[in-house]
Image (cartoon, rainbow, N blue to C red):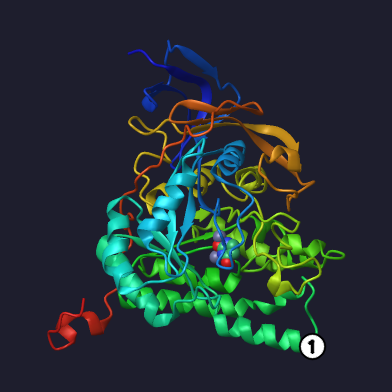
Amino acid sequence: MTFDTVIHSGTVVTADGQFKGDIGITGGRIAAVSEVISGGKTRVDAGGRLVMPGGIEAHAHIAQESSSGVMTADDYLSGSISAAFGGNSSFIPFAAQQRGQSVDDVIATYDARGARSVLDYSYHLIISDPTPDVLNDQLPRAFKRGITSFKVFMTYDLMNLGDGGMLDILSVARDHGAITMVHAENNDMVKWMNKRLAAKGLTAPRYHAISRPQLAEEEAINRAIQLAKLVDAALFIVHVSTEGGADIVRREKFNGAKLFAETCPQYLALTRDDLDRPGMEGAKYICSPPLRGHDTQDALWHHIAHGTFESVSSDHAPYRFDDTGKFINGSDIPYPKIANGMPGIATRLPYLFSEGVVKGRITPEQFVALSATNAAKTFGCTTKGRIAPGMDADIAIWNPEAKRVVQLQDQHDNMDYSPMEGMELVGVPEVVMNRGRTIVSHGELMATEGQGQFFARAPVDLRGRSGFTAPEFDPAQNFGSDLR
Ligand code: DUC
Ligand code: ZN
Ligand code: ZN
């Protein structure tokens, strides 16, 4: 057999184990994995390196307007380049519906934006306006096109669907094998806190953390799960930031709910004290849900190590520290008017590797599961996230010992700050491939604009999740009615 590329002499790590071996690549796919493979038009020496599936970044905001109309600093070109420098071979940003907009129009808009990507990409929809036509025609059409996941919000007045709206959309998703992602924070609790803080003149960035209580997340996570259980729908809780929220996810998941979840590096690396930096510096650390305390960091690491979360995602939401981003509403403004989110697509995996694998909190196999393999399963990326014959050659070769201090210029995004600036991290993704093409090699970008491809996704993989039949939906217990 002849190969386009052979990666040799490395330690191949998968979600299930690791072994010394070589990988043969032909036509963009992995053609062989074996102890020794000779030949290959190009031979890549991975001696002393870990050869892993390239990351799948499953939570990023790229070329996306927020609900209040603020455009992210990164488009699909800069966002995908930054992702690649961070060890990712593909990504799934959000395609956001504005109120009144059709899903078809949303997809057409993001198809034009996505065309600049250097990495393969798909989208999760964000649904803010679930009209009957959206529910009955437009979403099913999107699912058929391979966009099998979408996010909804339980907070923000412009986005919050309410419990009835959630049930409608969860039922549609269940009927089509799609997965609903949810931003779970109790809207009224947050609004009530905002009012109280404003009345007392407490509007500095540090009060952002106070305005979005941990209980607001815990309550909403629990409510979202019960809503999803009522209709036996698959649910993905995004950006879990609290110990209580993670505890609920764990309990419900291991009782069989069709439940999935992620947390993000910012909740592990930063705390609400960062919001209290001098002047308006704290604005850099405003994200929702907000940063919490040191005890939360320990609890979330415990949950990561023990399988509560499928993924650690970046929630890359890049708003610059200027009047195009954080301060689009003015420079000396109360925290609710500051753009909400922080960058992190390039640091997600280096942080998780350094603080997770190098510090012994997780194994290299868990790193692979959390960075790629589980996202592929959850979001139906059938040809990605694994090193096995037939899969896309989406591969990252890591030097597990190289040290690097996080610096803005190494992020390759369009941002003017990095929240992790100055952190020393161990482990560097030296080579990143997407479908066999080298995208990044030893700090050099090797890709050209637009070489990434959209990939269609399959329905959520629910193996191992028995689900739940509410007695009221069981014909045997509800006088024979079929309520589905
Ligand atoms: N939710 C996100 O996922 N990212 C940015 C802000 C938000 O509310
Ligand atoms: Zn969110
Ligand atoms: Zn997000």
**Residue reaching furthest to the right:** 278
121 w.r.t. 391: above or below: below
On the picture, is 71 further left or further right than 4?
right
Identified at 26% across, 61% down, the residue is: 176
Numbered disc total: 1
Q: Quadrant of the N terminus?
A: top left
Q: Which residue is pictured at 37% across the width and 45% down the height?
A: 381
What is the x, y in percent for residue 27? 36, 23
Residue matched to label 1: 200
In the rendered image, residue 33, in percent from the top left (x then y), is placed at: 39, 25
Residue type indicated by callout 1: Lys
Disc 1 secondary structure class: loop
Kindly tell me whether residue 114 is visible in this rendering. yes
Vertical placement of 89 versus 136: above or below? above
Q: Position of residue 246 (x, y in %)?
A: 54, 68
Drawn side of residue 302 relative to residue 293, left or right: left
- Spot occupied by residue 424 in the image (x, y as percentages of width and height): 76, 43
Q: Considering the image in quadrants, where does the C terminus appear? A: bottom left
Q: Nearer the viewer, residue 172 or 328?
A: 328
Q: Is residue 374 visible?
A: no
Within 10 Å of disc 1 (Cα), the crowding (few <14, some 14-19, many 20+) is few
Residue visible at 34% across and 43% down in the picture: 382
